[in-house]
Amino acid sequence: MELQGRKVAVVGMGGVFPTCTKLDDFADKLFSNQSLIREWDQAKHHGKQVRSSVSGYVTEEEMHLEAIYSSHIEDYPETYLDHLNRIPHAHLATADVGSIWAMLATLDAIKMADWQEDDIQSELTGVVVGSGGSGTKIARSAWRNFFELGKKSRSIGTHTVDRSMFYREAANISCLIKNKGVCESIGSACATGLGNIGHAYRLIQYGIQDRAVAGGVEGTSLESFIGFDGMQILSRGFTPEASSRPFDINRNGFVCSFGAGIVCLEAYDIAKARGANILGVIDRYFNNSDGDGNMFHPSYDGQKRLWKGLLGNSGMVPDVVKVHGTSTQVGDAIELFSIADMLGDKGYHIAAPKSQFGHMLGASGSVEMIAALLMLERQTVLPCLNSVQLNTELEYFQQADSWEGPQTPMAHFRELIPQEAFKKEINTVVCLNYGFGGTNSSILLSKDTQ
Amino acid sequence: MERQDIIDGLVEILKTVRTVDPAKLTQVTEETDFIADLGTPSTEMINIAAKIEQKFDIEFDDDDIDDLGSKVKDVVDLIVRTQEKA
């Protein structure tokens, strides 16, 4: 049984994006077909220890932050300075870089939402924000000082737990804005960003909260990069801007990136009554699991069920599908075929923002939903950069007797996948994200028409 | 080391604690309370203790830190006592 519940509006958004100073800068770069991916000096510094060296990263300096290192233990950021005085010291002291980004993005989103202090500090305002990583920059140094250098536990101080725990971004946001409703994090690997927004949507839909700050964050972390590099699944061999190439026949992995995406959600009727600028309406959220026992491999069946769960038998075809589109060999193909199975081969377009800024891990779902909201705002479809050539032959798994999907090669769907942004009437966008463990998430967004 | 020298050293440490208002550090005496007068978050006290150990090249006993009061004189007393033990 499913309750219809309340409609939910998106009324604010903010974020941290590679090479971008603010949201408008991010939008301008995306819609002018630019890549935000660069060679990363931190990765290159390790020479042959790493195989990939491109990333959509954000430096502390670019965010006007400065790490203050401990005077008594090695290489340990004791706290951060905010050279623009946006975040008070007491809140910087409890935050890792990702949590600071989360707080900054929240302030921007709330400003756009035009929420007043009574709204923010209400029992009906929640914070639902998470990340994929685990505060590795703080933890790595702390544990090295204790375990390898023999320092006392007190030498690493009182802020290792709060700066490395799961839920640290939500906790820091909540302490900053002083909301009195729920404060929690949803963790679902690379679906985390969308999963947190989806959970917040449900809290409002079912009347538990009236509004929520929601999204995902992934603070720049060489440790996260190295973890994926070790799995041999990062793109290599291309120039930075050509490295992320979803659906292209020569794709060979994703680009590990970092960022933050925060949205302000509000019960539609409340937002409408106060004359809020509604950036989009969340019509539906659906998530599920593959159920095939495989941690990594994407599931055609799981994604087909995801689509059924999202759209049912409505026959609805969204104007744009914002794909997960990581630029991995099997992942992109399975995703394309599951979309085609549900929607057919015409009447919509596919946007792949990871082609422009890489895979922001726990932030990807929320930053890409912001990209989807920008598509609604600008009535322009974002491209799939570098999708130059699609496979004209069947994928290996399409040739198996057990394959139940399309019997046409990826090249058959060429017209759905633009290589440059283009104008089009957009009233609906579906956002898709998947994560390790076989978790799948989807959201249906629409333009406010009332 | 004179007690005033120790207080001066403590003030130098407190200047590095961003959550303490520097304006409150101009008139620190033995009676000043870290938490009540300087507004030091209680969670920062252990960080300050670790910095004191480094600055004065001493090592506190865990029991002494557990029993430490929040006034400047409590900390000065402990530093003096620890220096004497060494």
Image (cartoon, rainbow, N blue to C red):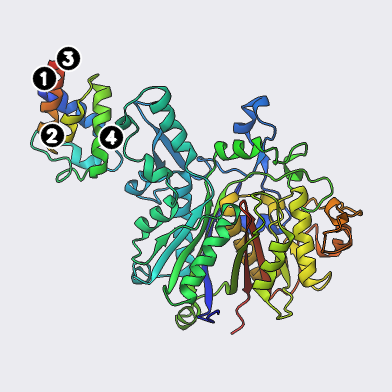
Q: Earlier in the sequence, mark 1 or mark 3?
A: 1
In the picture, measured across the screen, residue A294 lies left or right of residue A198, that is: right
Using the rendered image, report if marks 2 and 3 lie on a common chain.
yes
Numbered disc 2: secondary structure: helix
Chain of the residue under the numbered disc 4 shown in the image: B
Give me the C-alpha separation between circle 4 and circle 3. 22 Å
Residue A2: quadrant of the picture:
bottom right
Give the residue type at disc 2. Val
Give the residue type at disc 4. Asn
Choose mark 4 or mark 3, whichever is in front.
3
Query: Which label belongs to residue B86?
Result: 3
The residue labelled by disc 2 is B72
Give the residue type at disc 1. Glu
Using the rendered image, report if marks 1 and 3 lie on a common chain.
yes
In the picture, measured across the screen, residue B75 lies left or right of residue A319, that is: left
Q: Earlier in the sequence, mark 1 or mark 2?
A: 1
Q: Earlier in the sequence, mark 2 or mark 3?
A: 2
Give the residue type at disc 3. Ala
Q: What quarter of the picture does the C terminus of chain A occupy?
A: bottom right
Numbered disc 4: secondary structure: helix
Give me the C-alpha separation between circle 1 and circle 3. 17 Å
Residue A437 location, x and y as percent? 61, 52
